[in-house]
Image (cartoon, rainbow, N blue to C red):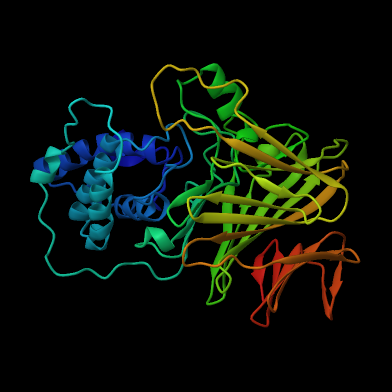
Amino acid sequence: PVLCGIWPIWAGDDGAWAEGPSYGLAYVQIMTMFATALKRGAGIDLYRRPFWANHGRWRQWCFPPYVEWMGFGDHTERWKTTWESNANLVDIIQRETGTPDLRRYVADFRAEAQKCSTRRIPAIPVFNAQLYLCEPLAQQDAVEDVTGVLRAFGGAGWAAVRTDMHNPAGDVAFIFRSSPYGAVSHSHANNNDFILHVGGKVMAMPSGYYCGYGSAHHVHWVWHTKSHNCVTLSDASQLMRSHDSLGAIANAYEDDRVAYMVGNADAGYSIQATRCRRHVMFIKRHNCFFMIDEFIAAPGVSSALQWNIHSWSPFVVDEQQRCFLLEREGSTLEGHFLFHNNAFFSLTEGWDPPPAPVKPSDQWHQQYHLRFSPTAMSDKCNLGVVLCPGHATLERAQVTTERAGGVEVARIGDDVLLVNDGERMEYEGLTSQAIAAAVVGGVVYEFTDDGLQH
């Protein structure tokens, strides 16, 4: 009854795994042994449940073969055995569920595994014997389900924007997490977190390394919201190690011009805030992200909003223009803050406390941290940021910002992005009480509690 009816406890029918690809790999792989035995021995096919095929698609969207940083949750290294095991798991899933459109993903993961580090001497390939029991896939080419750039997996609180899934050098991969499963087990206090890969290089990721569950570094850095690409409130974390630290992804939307979603982390910040949400719009014509962090303080509690981002590369900051630049091996990321009141940047590196040297790893690189902080403690704040990626074949979008009355404004070519810094926005004939608005290709989009209105 447990294995057939209750499992999986860290996932839903949409296939995402709350604790991330690494621990999802271990626990789903273990479950295939039961599912395969039950199917072959008793004729009961658990693989017909929607979780299985959707788990393969979640991995396809949120765990690209080329990634340098695996995803949210414990363990991040690119071990050859992990890459081979992931290929085997998805291969079993596609054969048992009849979803051959995952064939290319499996092949790409097997090829990428040959470039990964190994912990074994000699390096023995990983093979899952269950593949002998699976029916071979039909030889004809499969039509791949890659229409659009956005996929949201709301059951476990994951989403991804992918611009060129099968071309690492041209892909912009934005992976987002806001999970209803809480900050427990191998998950962290990181609702509304994101990872951004540009042209195959990770530009922004959570910081810290998995040097042992419950170690000083793990407890006081990795679990804490400050180590993630999230907002903190006067240095305070989301609720840590709590089933009440809930998040959600809502209002996912996509058309020919934009893709949009909102992460709701109100419950995770419940001590300091009644509302803490992150709206994310991807503007297709410019290949850039328009992000608004919406904060309303809890009654009687004063906090200052702090916007955090982490990278393997140092940040170059222009304080006057309120922007930063990252560069890594031909890939770049430029960020523009739509906030022209008093604010300041903080730049640091390393960790406090650092990871313990309990295992050798040449993948534990130095990490650099940027925090942008409005100076004032306020009851309410909408902080806008425009993130512009670039790579060898993608020129970064050129952004100009200004403050006009009570409205924060960014311009990208003919398109205009607006953030409401009061009760009402009025700008060039546009009047709105929305949280933010974007005029893209002549179409007005308003960011509201009911989703994107246009």
Q: How many marks?
A: 0
- Give the quadrant of the N terminus: top left
Relative placement, left or right, of 402 versus 140 is: right
One can see residue 414 in this view: yes
Residue 53 spot, x, y in % from top left: 30, 54
Say which of 123 and 160 sits in front. 123
Relative placement, left or right, of 451 versus 273 is: left
Q: Which residue of the protein is positioned furthest toward the right in this rendering?
A: 405
One can see residue 1 in this view: no
Residue 35 spot, x, y in % from top left: 21, 41
Relative placement, left or right, of 92 versus 174 is: left
Residue 338 spot, x, y in % from top left: 77, 58
Q: Is residue 436 above or below residue 248?
A: below
- Name the quadrant containing residue 41: top left
Q: Is residue 143 above or below residue 107?
A: below
Say which of 52 and 147 sits in front. 147
